């Protein structure tokens, strides 16, 4: 599993390198702020044809709104 939380270019390159090494599970979340970066990297990898979308598992989380509303 790869969890990316970094600046945009480093994050994109990390995702692409991880996929090239065999990673197939990527951890995203709104709170990590990595969804756009991961999406850009995956778009590039899919367009290159090195991996198919159906071979990648993307994990995401929904923020618990009860915590937000209680504040």
Image (tube, rainbow, N blue to C red):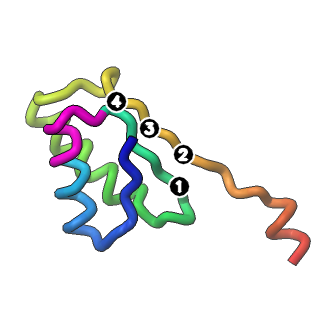
**Separation of marks 2 and 4 at Cα, in angstroms:** 13 Å
Res 55 quadrant in image: top left
Q: Please say if the residues under marks 2 and 4 sit with CB atoms less than 8 Å apart.
A: no
- The spot of residue 67 in percent (x, y) is 83, 66
Residue drawn at 33 percent across, 70 percent down: 6
Res 44 quadrant in image: top left
Q: How many marks?
A: 4
Q: Which mark is residue 60?
A: 2
- In the visual, does 8 lie left or right of 47? right
Residue 44 magenta-highlighted: no
Q: Which mark is residue 9?
A: none
Upstream in the sequence, badge 1 or badge 3? 1
Q: Quadrant of the C terminus?
A: bottom right
**Separation of marks 4 and 3 at Cα, in angstroms:** 6 Å
Q: Residues within 10 Å of mark 1 (few under 14, many from 20)?
A: some
Instruction: List the single residue furthest toward the right.
Output: 70
- The spot of residue 70 in percent (x, y) is 90, 72
Q: Residues within 10 Å of mark 3 (few under 14, many from 20)?
A: some
Upstream in the sequence, badge 4 or badge 1? 1
- The spot of residue 17 in percent (x, y) is 16, 48
Q: Secondary structure at mark 2?
A: loop
Instruction: List the single residue furthest toward the top.
Output: 54
Q: Secondary structure at mark 4?
A: loop
Residue carrying label 3? 58
**Separation of marks 3 and 2 at Cα, in angstroms:** 7 Å
Relative to 50, is 19 above or below?
below
Q: Secondary structure at mark 1?
A: loop
Residue carrying label 1? 29
Relative to 52, is 60 above or below?
below
Residue drawn at 21 percent across, 39 percent down: 19
- In the visual, does 41 lie left or right of 5? left
């Amino acid at each position: 599993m790869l969890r990316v939380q970094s600046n945009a270019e480093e994050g994109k390159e990390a995702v692409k390198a991880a996929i090239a090494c065999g990673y197939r599970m990527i951890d995203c979340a709104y709170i990590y702020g990595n969804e756009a970066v991961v999406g850009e990297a995956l778009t590039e990898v899919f367009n290159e044809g090195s991996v198919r979308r159906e071979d990648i598992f993307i994990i995401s989380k929904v923020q618990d709104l009860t915590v937000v509303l209680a504040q």
